Image: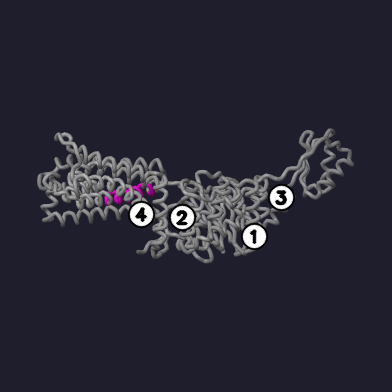
Amino acid sequence: MIEVKGLTKKFGNFTAVKDISFQVKAGETFALLGPNGSGKTTILKCITGLMSPTSGHIWINGIDVWKNSWEAKSLLSYLPQRVAFYENLTAREVLEFYCRLRKLPLDRIDQVLEKLHFSFNGFADRSVSEFSGGMIQRLGIAVAFLPNAPLLLLDEPTASLDPEGAIKFRKLIAMLKQEGKTILFSSHVLSDIEQLADRVAILVGGKLAAVESVEILKNAIRVNSRMRLLLNNPNENFIKTALDAGATEAKLLDAHLVVSSKPEDRLSILQALSKAGAIIKWFSTEEPSFEEIYLKYTL
Amino acid sequence: MIFGGGENIKLMDFNTVTTIAHQELKINIRAKWTLVFAGGFGIIALAISYFGLVTAGFVGFQGFTRTSASLLNLVLYLIPVVSLMMGTLSFTGEKSANELLFSQPVTRSEILLGKILGLFLSITTATFIGFGLAGFVIAVQVGTEGLTRFLAFVGLGLLLALVFLSLSAMVAILSGKKAKAFGFSLFLWFFFVLLYDLLVIGLTFVFKERTANIFIFLSLFGNPVDMVRVSSLILLNGTTIFGAAGAALVKFLGGQMASSLLLISALGVWVATPLLISDRVLRKQDI
């Protein structure tokens, strides 16, 4: 469905994205994962035809996005990271405008609002200036879902949603996956990637560090899950005890024993340490940070 | 008409253009700009018509021809600045709103033309409401003599609006940033309304008489404000009072009709050229 080949985008002397290549198959949910400034939005904007690549090519169903942008854009629907609308229009007027641009019948609006379970709390006929950030994001999502496009490009779609909105949105994506839509979204929220994506491209400083299936990424996260134990009787011998009980890594930092392991091995490690005489005053669990995951892929 | 987005070629869809124009008009009407300008135009036209001859010891409504002549300089000052400000505001609008719009399957040329058309309709609405109400009062008070000239004068004002909307689009697209675009727009207004004539007059001293006359004649086409001024005065039968450039033009072309047609065609070029430059730049610009 999407083929990105050798994509580089420069802004003056600054290279935002460097030599990126990946493919997204039809019906796949593909995520771009990376911190702010890693190039996720630039890649999505290049795919949408909003930005021209400095070098490289992008095809959607074999159509060159920049050379035949109108044709390519008719296959996709895009939700920008920060959605904004003219404040003196109502939500319904905004939706009607995009319906007309896409040459869709106006009754499509009610169908989409029903499908999304977005009622706008009775605000549909009120000015967008009265909307909260979350409601504007919902309106942006509604606009993106109007055309029933086979390809959805979503830039940080859950960033401005409240927890309830985010849950609804994840359910919606799951439903669209079942309908066979191709979805490409960017996020820096690991739980979004874990729940929604089939594959993920990891971006570091504008470069592609890896393209992995989410299962492999999950495993990387699981293996790197950590426990931090505060011991009353710290002892170097407890390192070996933890490693023997299944830890992938263990180290003693003053009175803290830091143990990396799969989550399912945590209990047996705790039991082994207790049996070996460790007096555990307190413990906490930690998920690996982005940086740690990136390091795994970049080193 | 064939226009494209990126490198592709696609027939322009006028339904898309009118949809965007309708949206632009709605935004401007809701933002109350249109009503403010309509009110302003109406009050100024009535005031000028009523008090226009106060220095001659007469107070009361003048006919359409005199009102048009009195309004001329004000229109030449106001219409360019109103058009430049509205255009710049629209073309440097909310970036995120533009992202959503430009990601739709519409060409950038359609967006550009739709916005220009919507802005032009906003100014046309303001002008018709303002000058229309004033015209109604004048017609009731002193009759309809000279109404056709007044309407043609309003038409020339709208053509001037279209020129400056086109320039505002070019300035906004080339500048990219709002503050920069507003700065350039204000400079353009200052240049065409105030500075240009001073420069031309200054330069005529450099040339010999015959060359200076040709220079003055040609200089007319370098300033749309001057072209509308001359066209309006030809229209209002004021050829004897508008100076060397206009007199030279009318003489050179052998008639008022030919001069008017030439000036209106030249104004058409002033509309089309910035639009074509804007279109070319916008097609390759990052949003």
Asked if the stretch drawn in magenta spans residue B50, the answer is: no
Q: Chain of mark 2?
A: B
- On the same chain, marks 1 and 4? The answer is no
Estimate the x, y position of residue B181 in percent, counting from the top left.
Answer: 37, 43
Contact (Cβ within 8 Å) of mark 3 with mark 1? no
Q: Quadrant of residue A210?
A: bottom right
Which mark is first along the chain, 4 or 2?
2
Estimate the x, y position of residue B279 in percent, counting from the top left.
Answer: 37, 55
Estimate the x, y position of residue A171 in percent, counting from the top left.
Answer: 65, 55
Q: Chain of mark 1?
A: A
Q: Residues within 10 Å of mark 1 (few under 14, many from 20)?
A: few
On screen, residue A169 versus residue A144, left or right, reads right
Q: Is residue A103 visible?
A: yes
Q: CA distance from mark 1 to mark 2?
A: 27 Å
Residue displayed at 15% across by 34% down: B57
Q: Secondary structure at mark 2?
A: helix
Magenta segment's dominant SS is: helix
Q: Quadrant of residue B204?
A: top left
Residue displayed at 26% across by 55% down: B268
Q: CA distance from mark 3 to mark 2?
A: 38 Å
Q: Of the numbered discs in the image, which one, if any, rests on residue B102?
A: 2
Q: Residues within 10 Å of mark 4 (few under 14, many from 20)?
A: many
Q: Of the numbered discs in the image, which one, if any, rests on residue A175?
A: 1
Q: Of the numbered discs in the image, which one, if any, rests on residue B236?
A: none
Q: Which residue is mark 3?
A: A221
Residue displayed at 32% across by 50% down: B124
Q: Give the residue type that dot 4 points to.
A: Leu
